Image (spheres, coloured by chain):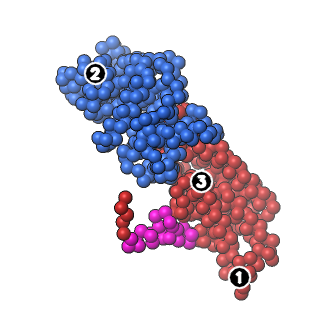
Amino acid sequence: MGARVTMHRGEAPAIAVENLTVAYDRHPAVHHVSCRFEPGSLTAVVGPNGAGKSTLIKTLVGLLKPAEGRVSAGGLTRADIAYLPQQAEIDRSFPITVADTVALGHWRRVGILGTLTGAMRRQVGEAMSAVGLEGFEDRAIGSLSVGQFQRVLFARLLLQDARVILLDEPFNAIDARTTADLIDLVERWHGEGRTVVAVLHDMDQVRRHFPATVLLARDLIAAGPTADCLTAEHLLRARQMSENWHEDAAVCEPARRSA
Amino acid sequence: MTLWSLLFEPFADYAFMRRALVACFALALGCGPVGVLLMLRRMSLIGDAMSHAVLPGAAVGFLFFGLNIWAMGLGGLVAGLSVALLSGLVTRTTNLREDASFAGFYLISLSLGVLIVSTRGSNVDLLHVLFGTILAVDDASLLTVAAIATLSLFVLALIYRPLIVECFDPGFLRAVGGGGSLFHVVFLVLVVVNLVAGFQALGTLMAVGLMMLPAAASRFWAGQVWTMSAVAIGVAMASGWLGLLVSYHLDLPSGPAIVITAGVFYVGSIVFGTEGGIFWRALPRRHLEA
C-alpha cells in the first residue's frame, strides 16, 4: 500500500457535538448527545442497531438537520469533510466506470463544469493502485465484488484529501484481507493528522485500531479512550436499549438535557 | 421497386416528408439523452405519466388556436410543469413516494384534458391531440423542435455531472455541497419540454415513445451514459426515418409507425444486444477461467 496521494495535511479544528437530538418524525434517533472529536483523533462510533450511529455521522456531514442542539466545527467547510456512505445507499447497477467513480474525489477542485487535468488523472491512477485496483479503470462498478467496490470508495476518499473523514460502516460484509488493507489506509490517515470517525460493529477491531470510542444507544452511553469506554457495564447498558418507537411516547422535557 | 425509391425517394420528392424527417432527427437529439437519464433515474414510467399530464394544457391550446405548436406547447408546458412540480413537492414533503404522487396528479390532469376536449371539441380533435400529425409540420414547429433540442443538449451538458452523481450516489453529491433538488427540477423541466416538442409530431400519447424506447434499447448496446445516449439518438433517428417510410409506403399514420419502429429496435436489442442480450446469454458457451 505505498500510496503517494497526499496533497495537504494540517490539523482540523475539533468537532463538538452539543446536546444533539436528531429525530425522524419527532422520534429521536440521537437523543441529547454531547461528545467531542479532537483534531487528528481516530474515533469509533459503536452501539446496537438503531442506536443512531449513522444518524450521528450524517448530521456531522450536514445531511440531516438537528432537531435540537448543534454540531460546531469551528471553520470547517464541506470541502474539509469526506464522507463514506453505506454501500446500500449507492446504486451499483448504474453504468459508470471505476475510474470515473474514483475521479469524483476531485469534485472540490473540478466542481460541476471543470475538467480533469493530466495531474488529476495521474492522481486517480495513484489512488487506484493505493487500494490495489490497478487495471480496473474501465470496469463497470456493477461488475465488482462488495470488497472491490469498497476499495473504489476508499480511493475516492484518498483523492478527496479531506482533513476530516467520516466512514459509515466501512467494513460491513468485507473480507479479512480487504478489511486489513483498508484499516491500513485509515491508520495512515490518522498518522497524517486527519480526524477520522468510523461507525463500526466489530469490538475487537475497535479495541485494536481505534484509540477513542463513542458508545451510543440513542443516548450517549460513554465517550473517551476506548478501554474506558468499552467496559462490560457500558456495553450491557447499550444492549438494553430498546428499539421501540412508541406512538404514545411522552414529549421530551427540557429538564432532561442536563441528565 | 429499387432501393433508392424504397428508402430515399419519398424524401427527395416531397417537402412534407423532408420536414417530417428533420423534425424526427431534431426530436431524436433531445429525446435520446433525456430518455437515457430518465431511465437511469428509474423514472421511465414517470415519463409516460408526464406525457399524459400535458394533455389538458395542449387541449386548451388546441381548442382556442387549432393545431398551433405555440399555443399547444405553452399549454402543455404549463400543465406538465404543474404536475411535475406539485408531485415533486408532495414527494419531498410527505411520505408518498415519487411514483405514487406522479400517478395521482397525472390522472387528475389527464381526466381534465379528456373532459375539456370532449365538451368543446370533436373526436377528430381528440385524435389530433393524442396522435399528432407529423406530416403537417410547418416552419414554426420545425424551428420550435430544433430550438428545444438545442436547448436540451446545452442544459444537459451544463448539469451532466451532478445529474449523474445524483442518480447513483446522492449522499456524495449532497456531502460535497453539489446540490441535488435543483438539478432534479431542471431535469423535469427538460423532460416536459421534450415531450412538448414531440407532441405535434407524435401526439401527446406517443411523444414519450421516441424518448423511452430508444433509451431502453441503448442499455443493451452500451455501458456508459454518454455512449448510451449516442446509441439512443441513433435508434431514435433510425426509427423516425424508417417509421416515416413505413407510413408512406403502407399508407399508415406516421406517429404510431415511428413508435412501432422504435419498438422493433427495442425488442431486437433485448434479443441481440451485445450487453446482456438474450440471444448471447442463451448460447451454450464455456465459462472462462477468471
Task: Kindly indicate the quadrant of the structure image that contains residue A175.
Answer: top left
Percent across and percent down for residue B14 are 80, 75
The three-letter amino acid code for the residue at tag 2 is: Thr
Percent across and percent down for residue A203 are 25, 30
Q: Main secondary structure of the magenta part?
A: helix
What's the residue at 30%, 27% (across, down)? Answer: A209
What's the residue at 43%, 18% (across, down)? Answer: A39
Mark 1 belongs to chain: B
Q: Are marks 1 and 2 in contact (CB under 8 Å)?
A: no
The shade of chain A is blue
State left or right for residue B3 relative to residue A107: right
The three-letter amino acid code for the residue at tag 3 is: Trp
C-alpha gap between disc 1 and disc 3: 33 Å
Residue segment shown in magenta: B263-285
Q: Which residue is mark 1?
A: B3
Q: Residues within 10 Å of mark 2 (few under 14, many from 20)?
A: many
Task: Kindly indicate the quadrant of the structure image that contains residue B184.
Answer: top right
C-alpha gap between disc 3 and disc 2: 49 Å
Q: Which residue is mark 3?
A: B226
C-alpha gap between disc 1 and disc 2: 80 Å
Q: Which residue is mark 2?
A: A226
